[in-house]
Image: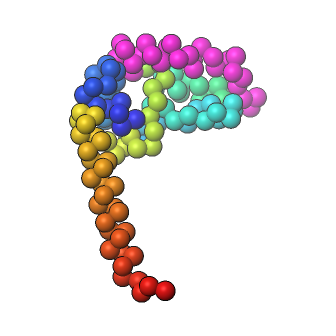
Amino acid sequence: TRFMLTRESAIHPDIKQALLEASLLDTRLIKRTLRRTSRVLRNAVSDEVVTLERRPQGASFEELESLLSGARGHAALQSGKVHDGLICASQVIGLIDDIPSCAEVVERLVRQCRERLNTTEVFMRSFPAS
C-alpha cells in the first residue's frame, strides 16, 4: 500500500487521492467465505462481494469471480474510477498522509529502523549484564 502512494506509482491520480483520504474504516475484508481473506478499499464492488458473502449460504468463487477479476481491478487502477473494481488497501492506509518518491519512502524506513534499533540498544544497556 505504501508504494502505491508514491510519485512513481503507475496508478491513476484519482485512485491515489482516494487512498490518501481513506482511513482503516474505509476498508473491507473480502473473500472470507473462500478462506482467502483480503483487505480492500471500500467501494461498490467490495460492498457487493460482502453482501454476497453474508448470505446464509455464503458465496462460491463462481458467484464472485466477475467481481474479483484482476482485469477489472487493473482497469480501475488505470482509469481512476474508484468504484469499478477492487483496490487493495492494507491496514496502514490510515497512516499514510503524503505521496513521496520511492526513494523518500526507503530513506524514511531506514531512518525509522535505525532510530528504533538505537532506542532498543539504549534500553537494553539499562539492564545489568548476567
| Residue 50 is inside the magenta segment | no
| Residue 59 is inside the magenta segment | yes
Q: Is residue 38 visible?
A: yes
Q: Nearer the viewer, residue 116 or 73?
A: 116
**Coordinates of residue 126 in the picture (x, y in percent):** 36, 82
Q: Is residue 127 left or right of residue 13?
A: right
Magenta extent: 56-82
Q: Is residue 47 left or right of residue 16?
A: right
**Coordinates of residue 94 in the picture (x, y in percent):** 36, 43
Q: Tell me what residue is drawn at x 41 percent, y 16 percent.
A: 76
Quarter of the figure with the N terminus:
top left
Q: Tell me what residue is drawn at x 27 percent, y 47 percent.
A: 108
Q: Is residue 74 left or right of residue 56?
A: left
What secondary structure is the stretch in magenta mostly built from?
helix
Q: Is residue 71 left or right of residue 60?
A: left
Q: Tell me what residue is drawn at x 30 percent, y 54 percent.
A: 112
Q: Quadrant of residue 107?
A: top left
Q: Is residue 55 visible?
A: no
**Coordinates of residue 63 in the picture (x, y in percent):** 68, 17
Q: Residue at the front extreme?
A: 130
Q: Tell me what residue is drawn at x 64 percent, y 25 percent.
A: 52
**Coordinates of residue 4 in the picture (x, y in percent):** 36, 30
Q: Quadrant of residue 75?
A: top left
Q: In the image, is residue 39 above or below residue 115?
A: above
Q: Nearer the viewer, residue 80 or 103?
A: 103
